Amino acid sequence: MTQQPGSAEGPASADEDGAAPDQVRAELAGWVGQHWDPDMALRAWRELLLESGWAAPSWPRRWHGRGLPAWSDEVVASELVRLGAVGIPVGSGTWLAAPTILAHGSDDVRDRLLRPILTGEQTWCQLFSEPGAGSDLAGLSTSAVLDGDTWIINGQKVWNTSAHHADMGMLLARTDRDVPKHQGITYFALPMKQPGVEVRQLRQMNFHASFNEVFLTDARIPRDNVIGEVGQGWTAALTTLAYERRFSALQRPRYSPAPGRALDEARAEADDHFATYSWYPQRAGRPDLVIEHARSAGVTGDPVIRQAIARLLTLHRVSSWTAERARVARALGARPGAEGSIGKLAASNLARESARVHAMIAGAQGLLTGPDSALGGVIAEVLMSVPGQSIAGGTDEIQKNILAEKVLGLPGEVRVDRDIPFSQIKHRG
Ligand SMILES: Cc1cc2nc3c(=O)[nH]c(=O)nc-3n(C[C@H](O)[C@H](O)[C@H](O)COP(=O)(O)OP(=O)(O)OC[C@H]3O[C@@H](n4cnc5c(N)ncnc54)[C@H](O)[C@@H]3O)c2cc1C
């Protein structure tokens, strides 16, 4: 059975006649008033959230939800923080793995894997890309062979964000080489802490080290840790990729600064998680800083720079409308669609344009790091980080292909290796 987010096994009271956000907020506030205690352990608080269905309100009751409309997830997450409490963790587990498991996993997989994601007990990373398979993800060659009750995995993954501290991996591996490349892939939940999994951190040109190479040598996965059907992993992978293109999924919750064990643990969890992503704002180009930067450099009277700033801020405003359109579509229950690709392209253009304007303002100074450099080294980090924006989650060219083929209905790219068995694709041997 495939159960989509938003469908209910049994409606909660707030949903009976089609709940309104204010009703949901009021019911949540009443429940929080009765149950929230900042001195309890974070895990214990999250168990209560799961039991009550406030953990994932748009999900079915059986999987920690209340069957409320899709908008309720966002409303409840922000309301919990506004009330001084804490919601479910932020990260690849809740952002990517959980919706994929909910959409494609068997009931057994949902029962076992969703709970520890929502309590924060297990963090996840995405093990998709390989040295020979990035844009051409379906060309991946990591293999999975069933041996009794265990899948044995061999191969190499790369660019895996947060793999160095993840408990579980969303792994794509090939289980059948004798069918066309999209058909022989299976989506697994891989336990990361085991001898067959070696994670090596990579150092980036902006000096951060947020992603890794992952070497899999006879790594083991229990037979039932398959998400979707064996050989049907591509469909589930498309779900993960669509969620990955959603906007603003990585926003840090603004937890109350008040004392209390649950709040301390939530703040520490967020610090730990967001350490990996500390350069992501710079990756987006920091258009929010251009005016401050121009003022501090004393160039606000320069007509060329003024024009460039006006053009950039216009682009920023227009992209935020696209992001808002995507947010509203999601809130109304639409699954991630073409607006994800449009938004991702807009974000790349904005980041590049922003880096160009910062470079115009800073001149050669922009390359310096340290406290005396442009905005304390932030501009140098912008210039070194922006290229990642148009690569992560599918490159600009791939987004353009998706839009051309899936939205505009233009003729498809020539793909000579699409319909022949994977084993017959020449360069893959
Ligand atoms: C910050 C960051 C975080 C990442 N995190 C993860 C992660 O957690 N897990 C994970 O699995 N991966 C991750 N990635 C990897 C990312 O998904 C890949 O880098 C991306 O899909 C591109 O693949 P590639 O690097 O192999 O480039 P290639 O696919 O080799 O592309 C090289 C160039 O060729 C172009 N190109 C390729 N095919 C076509 C085509 N058909 N038409 C037109 N142009 C084409 C591309 O646009 C690109 O310019 C991350 C990458 C970044 C930058």
Image (cartoon, rainbow, N blue to C red):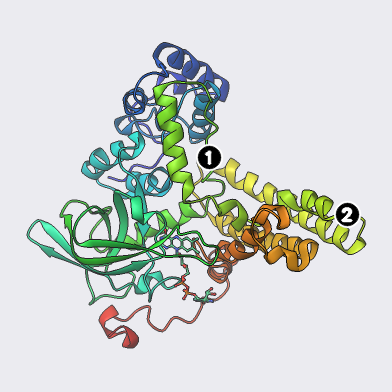
Residue at point 47%, 23% (across, down) = 85
Q: Amino acid at mark 1?
A: Arg
Q: Is residue 57 visible?
A: no
Which corner quadrant holds the N terminus?
top left
Q: Secondary structure at mark 1?
A: loop
- Picture coordinates of residue 69, whole percent (x, y): 48, 32
415 sits to left or right of 321: left
Say which residue label 2 marks.
300
- Badge 2: few (under 14), some or many (20 or more) residues near its Cα, within 10 Å? some
Q: Is residue 368 above or below residue 333?
A: below
**Callout in the foreground (2, 1):** 2
- Picture coordinates of residue 357, whole percent (x, y): 76, 62
Q: In front here: 406 or 348?
A: 348
- Picture coordinates of residue 173, whole percent (x, y): 27, 65
Mark 2 or 1 closer to N-term?
1
- Picture coordinates of residue 41, whole percent (x, y): 34, 24
Q: In front here: 405 or 216?
A: 216
Does the numbered disc 1 mark a residue whose Cβ is under 8 Å from ligand 1? no
Which residue of the protein is positioned furthest toward the left in this rendering? 148
Q: Secondary structure at mark 2?
A: loop
Residue at point 39%, 27% (across, down) = 66
Q: Amino acid at mark 2?
A: Thr
Residue at point 21%, 42% (across, down) = 108
Which corner quadrant holds the C terminus?
bottom left
Q: Is residue 165 above or below residue 235?
A: above
Q: Is residue 80 above or below residue 105?
A: above
Q: Is residue 203 visible?
A: yes
Query: For the residues marked 2 and 1, what is the alpha-carbon distance in whole angstroms?
Result: 32 Å
Say which residue label 1 marks.
252
Which residue of the protein is positioned furthest toward the bottom in this rendering? 426
350 sits to left or right of 420: right
- Badge 1: few (under 14), some or many (20 or more) residues near its Cα, within 10 Å? some
